[in-house]
Amino acid sequence: MKKKILIIGGGLSGIYLGYLLKKEGFSIKILEANDRIGGRIYTKNSYTTNVELGATWLWRYNPALLKVCSDLNISLFEQNMDGDALFEAMQSSTPQHFQVPKNQEISYRIVGGTVEILNKLKATFTEDQIELNQKVLKIDDEESSIKVTTETSTFITDFVISTIPPQVLVNSVHFSSDLDSGFKQIANNTHTWMKDSIKFALVYKTPFWKEKGLSGVGFSNVGPFTEIYDHSDFENTHFALMGFLNGGLANETKEYREEKIQEQLFKFFGEDGKKYLSYEEKVWNEDQLVNFKNDSFITPHFNNGHTIYQQKFLNGKLIIAGSETSPKYGGYMEGAVYRGNQVLEQIKNSFQ
């Protein structure tokens, strides 16, 4: 009889792990609390243009992720850096033109959007193997199985893999058998990548910045946006700019942030910058599935890949996975895939 494995979380970590385990013959069920898969991969279609409000780039030093893209026949293209970039040093100064060094590491994007990875992986599952809107509330360690309770259902399985951020796990899921206090302390002090970020995107009718000899790349010490990039598609038929806002604006309203962005766009690009078709944003610390709100600051990537995540819990029936637990590239897509490959070997060894 096939061993049943339940995966908590339908982001890249959970979907990729399910894909691997299915190929090895395990019976898989993935529970996702949101109404979409993807987690911190969030490709949104705005005004017929795909914009990334979550994970966006990969690099040549991401071998695990590049292999997945190759295996799934996913095409990549270089992030456009042609033309002058802009730098705003002070509020009172005009943004200065500069050239990004040619020897800078090339960033790549995925043709069709980062969501293409998820779409290709999801196509290998049957409809009943991924359940949305299933927020896990409780995990019970039973004698020969493990019981997972959500807001609407109960699942009995042989093994559980959690791929949600460790800090979110220990603060949102009740365990009938107490987890080690040392583990809880480390989980509560493990940084969740993206949780401090605000990403925004602007869709335009034409790539006016290219017509001005600009790359669309800009940096600012002032804000509200601190970085901005050309976000046009591979076919060069849909045009956008995308970037990051100062995290201190998270407590302001969307309307306030957009108003301040308009002022800065005028400084960078003139009137053309303000003539966008749509504005999109994602304030990640408002997402309860990514961020457990508390008052403590955690240094980015702190405790990512901690050795405690190599252990099994609940009498060997629970593994804590996900990108933040990866010993390499914790928090990134590469980390999600690397850790998935690692957990696959742990599972195979458990059932040999």
Image (cartoon, rainbow, N blue to C red):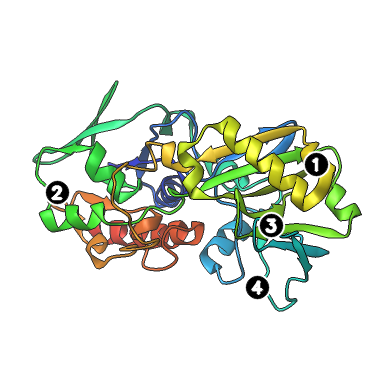
> In the image shown, does 60 or 243 lie closer to the viewer?
243
Identify the element where label 4 is drawn: loop
Q: Nearer the viewer, mark 2 or mark 3?
A: 3
Foreground of the two, 178 or 296: 296
Residue closest to the far right = 211
Q: Are marks 3 and 4 in contact (CB under 8 Å)?
A: no
Q: Amino acid at mark 1?
A: His
Q: Which quadrant: the N terminus?
A: top left
Q: Residues within 10 Å of mark 1 (few under 14, many from 20)?
A: some
How far from the left and from the top, in percent, is residue 295? 29, 46
Badge 1 or badge 4: first in the primary sequence = 4
- Tag 2 residue: 314
In the drawing, what numbered circle is on residue 38? none
Q: Quadrant of residue 348?
A: bottom left
Q: Is residue 22 above or below residue 126?
A: below
Q: Residue at x 67, y 48 (%)?
A: 242
Q: Which badge, 4 or 2, comes first in the chain's sequence?
A: 4
Residue 122 coordinates in the image, percent (x, y): 53, 40
CB atoms of marks 2 and 1 within 8 Å: no
User: Where 233 falls versus 50 (above or below)?
Assistant: below
Q: Residue at x 35, y 56 (%)?
A: 191
Residue position marked by numbered label 1 in the rendering: 238
Residue bearing mark 3: 92
> Is residue 55 toward the left or the right of residue 155 in the image?
right
Instruction: Kindly check if marks 4 and 2 are in contact, taking CB atoms under 8 A apart as contact.
Output: no
Q: Residue 57 at x, y = what percent?
A: 61, 57
Q: Could you tell me which secondary element the residue under label 2 belongs to?
A: loop
Rounded to the nearest whole Å, what is the CA distance between mark 1 and mark 4? 25 Å
